[in-house]
Image (tube, rainbow, N blue to C red):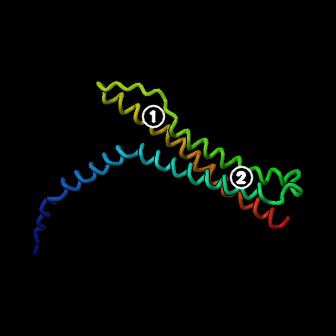
Amino acid sequence: MNETLVQPEPPDELVEETRAFWREIGKTMVRESIGTIDETAKQIIGVAGILEGLYFHAIAYSNLREQVVGWSLVAYLVPIVLLLCSLIAALGVFCPDRYRVSFHSSKASQLVYERVVKSKLLFLRIASIFLVLGVAAILPAVLLYLTG
């Protein structure tokens, strides 16, 4: 019987370095999460504000006053309302809450931090949804304008 012994592989010397790398990435993600949410909310405010202004300007200076009756009025107003809701929700990201943090307790600080991130993320998601819906609602309004 010819058995060959399988030698165990030598331990990977980079395992600890890899673990340290991913721990540092995790720390950076946690540190920057609130700033990232705030920056995204600022961008949504900018985009929604520009779209709101352009859309309102297009309606105000068009000859729609004679054509808008009934459901067509709703079709033209829905994008404005949705974009306005997006702006309001994005501004909610910046509304401070009362943060009672005990700096002597790491667990209390962690809980407050997680609550803040969760609240900001909820407002950001709502703002994003309203922004997408507002942009989507512009298409039927444009089609109605072009066909009618």
Does any portion of residue 28 appear in the rendered image?
A: yes
Mark 1 crowdedness (10 Å alpha carbons): few <14, some 14-19, many ≥20: few
Residue 46 x/y as whole percent = 56, 52
Q: Earlier in the sequence, mark 2 or mark 1?
A: 2
Does any portion of residue 1 appear in the rendered image?
A: no
Which image quadrant: the C terminus? bottom right
Q: Amino acid at mark 1?
A: Arg
Residue 13 x/y as whole percent = 14, 59
**Residue 100's quadrant in the figure?**
top left
Instruction: Provide the residue designation for mark 1.
Output: 115
Which image quadrant: the N terminus? bottom left
Mark nearer the viewer, 2 or 1: 2
Along the horizontal axis of the image, is 15 left or right of 116? Answer: left
**Which residue shows up at 31% across the image and 30% down it?**
106
**Which residue shows up at 67% across the image and 57% down it?**
54
**Which residue shows up at 55% across the image and 46% down it?**
125
Along the horizontal axis of the image, is 87 left or right of 77? Answer: left
Which of the two residues, 16 or 40, is positioned nearer the viewer here? 40
Numbered disc 1: secondary structure: helix
Whole-angstrom CA distance, mark 2 to mark 1, is: 32 Å
Numbered disc 2: secondary structure: helix
Along the horizontal axis of the image, is 94 left or right of 21? Answer: right
Mark 2 crowdedness (10 Å alpha carbons): few <14, some 14-19, many ≥20: many
Residue 29 x/y as whole percent = 35, 48
Instruction: Provide the residue designation for mark 2.
Output: 79
Q: Amino acid at mark 2?
A: Pro
**Label ID, residue 46:** none
Instruction: Spot the residue most to the front.
Output: 61
Along the horizontal axis of the image, is 28 left or right of 66? Answer: left
